[in-house]
Amino acid sequence: MWVYVIRRILAVIPVMAVVAVVVFLILHLSPEDPAAIIAGDNAKSEDIDAIRQRLGLDRPLLIQFLEWVGRLLTGDLGSSIFLNRPVLQLIGERVEPTAALAVTTTIFSVVLAIPLGVVAAWKAGTWIDQLIMGLAVLAFSFPVFLIGYGLVYGLALEWELLPVQGFVSLSEDPGRFLAHLVLPTIALGLVYTALLARMTRATMLEILNEDYIRTARAKGLANGRVLIVHALKNAAVPIVTTVGVGIALLIGGVVVTESVFAIPGVGRLTIDAVLQRDYPVIQGVILAVAGVYVLINLAIDLTYTVLDPRIRY
Amino acid sequence: MTDIAALPADAAVAGPSRFAFSRILRRHPTMLVGGVILVVMAVVSLLAPWLAPYDPIELNVVDRLRPPDEDYLLGTDAYGRDMLSRLLYGGRVSLAVGLCVAAFSTVLGLLIGVVAGYYRLADALLMRVMDGLMAIPGILLAIALMTVTRASIEVVIVAITIPEIPRVVRLVRAVVLSIREQTYVQAAVAIGTRFPRLLRKHILPNTLAPLVVQATYIFAHAVLVEAYLSFLGVGTPPEIPSWGNVIAEGRLYVQIAFWQVLFPGIALALMVLSINLLGDGLRDLLDPRLSRRA
């Protein structure tokens, strides 16, 4: 088991190395001069030179890369060109709304999707199954902003039930913190719920065909017990893996949802950085997000090794 | 998203007449519905220059923010541009981006996947690169790629294609790996079949069905991502009407002119839904082995 654990931890290194190369290349593969793009259309050539020097773009590519990685390893993600502040600090200021929305959406979706998926698999082929799967395909075809603006228009503007936009920190006012998260969570959560429900149903169907399920039924166990104890317990590993892998998708959705509800999170930071071509911020955000994603999935995989004695590589 | 979607649904029937047209329609009504909606939307978008009642770009400040009426069936935006005309033209962007992304990512993914599945040495390297790419959320990667050069539809296509490739590679590689272990393939190799023939006779036919299904889901996802990028202001440039940037402009007036968000939103949802329904139908049709378990 320990060999697997160590190998799994070491596997993080090549993944993050590739991420670093990709992030580095985004700035350097540009057919245009990034310094000129940053400086804008009306820049003088000495401004462009100054930016080029500041970003170190005048040195050989490999040297730039090694120096940049060297700084990354000490935890230095560089500084924003426009705000002149460390990228890590900028991300730190914006991380609370983004993390909060990601967590509430995950909870909302898991709580809703797993029962729906289980019921759909149990009643496979009946109208209940068809209804649930029909709603699921509808939900994940709907763009987040259509659901988002629909909720804003219906619930928040017409009836003034909930705050329409913005974010309040948990430390400031827990009640208003939650109130501001309700609509974004539903808007994003419906899409994510649909995906998880489909996945849960598919996994459950596969497991319900296993011999031990037939044995359990033959023993005369109650349906509910077979479903929960025998089937769902065994479906847990693939379902949780999907939740973990789905985080990449979730983060993409969070960026869009933040924009719909004017939430000042990491998504807003990224879009502003892209519009201004603030490369250090873009690079820093991608590295940080990919890092979090890799670590969460590492944690999920390692939890299995401890919890599930069948997983031995 | 797509690999979750590529899993079984209701039952399909195997047999020689599985591909008979009337039978397909009877057995897979969702595919029919999806296909019809998609074809109608595609035809209407392609005919936009003839169907659109107004110029989608020309400003007409007198008629700004007009609600839907007989002059402007879907109302006008803040610059007095006809919403219906803008939506018709916007459909062309969605279709072009969706189809190109689906085609490019499938072909590139197939190429890389076959190489990875067949050549052990390349496999380790290629799959590490794919793992790395998959660790970056697709929309975030696409947003970052948009900074590489000035925004245009071509750049949008490239930016959405790259994050889609790894999943195709994984799918193709898995098929190739399982095929090369099959006795009939090993026999083919033993009698001296060369790689191109092996590819044509054994690998491609076995990859085709899952690949077509995957391509459909990529199509749907790409249409959605293009709209998201344009909505965020980092996609299709604002001078070209696309559903995403029409919504981005309309959002400012959502309280007084909800139709600016509602109609493009519905168009987008309808197109994505029709492609997803088509994908589900194709999956059930082409992969009865998966579906029969249901």
Image (cartoon, helix red, strand yellow):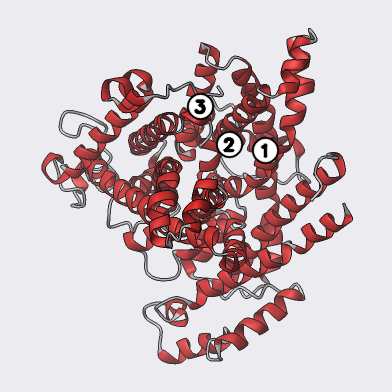
Residue shown at 37% from the left, 69% from the top: B150
- Whether label 1 touches label 2, CB < 8 Å: yes
What is the distance, in whole Å, between disc 3 and disc 2 at their CAs?
23 Å
Q: Is residue B200 left or right of residue A295?
A: left
Q: Is residue B150 above or below residue A144?
A: below
- Extreme residue toward the front, this view: B191
Residue linked to disc 3: B291
Q: Which residue is rendered at x = 59% and y = 86% of the image?
A: A62
Amino acid on which disc 2 is placed: Tyr
Q: Say which chain tag 2 marks.
A: A
Chain where mark 3 sits: B
**Figure quadrant of residue A79:** bottom right
Q: How far is mark 1 from mark 3, CA to CA?
A: 29 Å
Q: Can the viewer see residue A157 in this picture?
A: no
Label ID, residue B13: none
- Residue under label 1: A106
Q: Nearer the viewer, mark 3 or mark 2?
A: 3
User: Judging from the image, what secondary structure is the residue with disc 2 in?
Assistant: helix
Percent position (x, y) of residue B98?
Answer: 35, 48
Total labels: the figure holds 3
Helix, strand or loop under label 1 = helix
Q: Position of residue B249 (x, y in %)?
A: 36, 48
Q: Determine the secondary structure under disc 3.
A: helix
Image mark for residue A192 = 2
| Image quadrant in which you'd find residue B243 | top left
Image location (x, y in percent) of residue B87: 27, 41
Please say if A243 is above or below A111: below
The kind of residue tagged 1 is Thr
Residue toward you, B21 or A138? B21
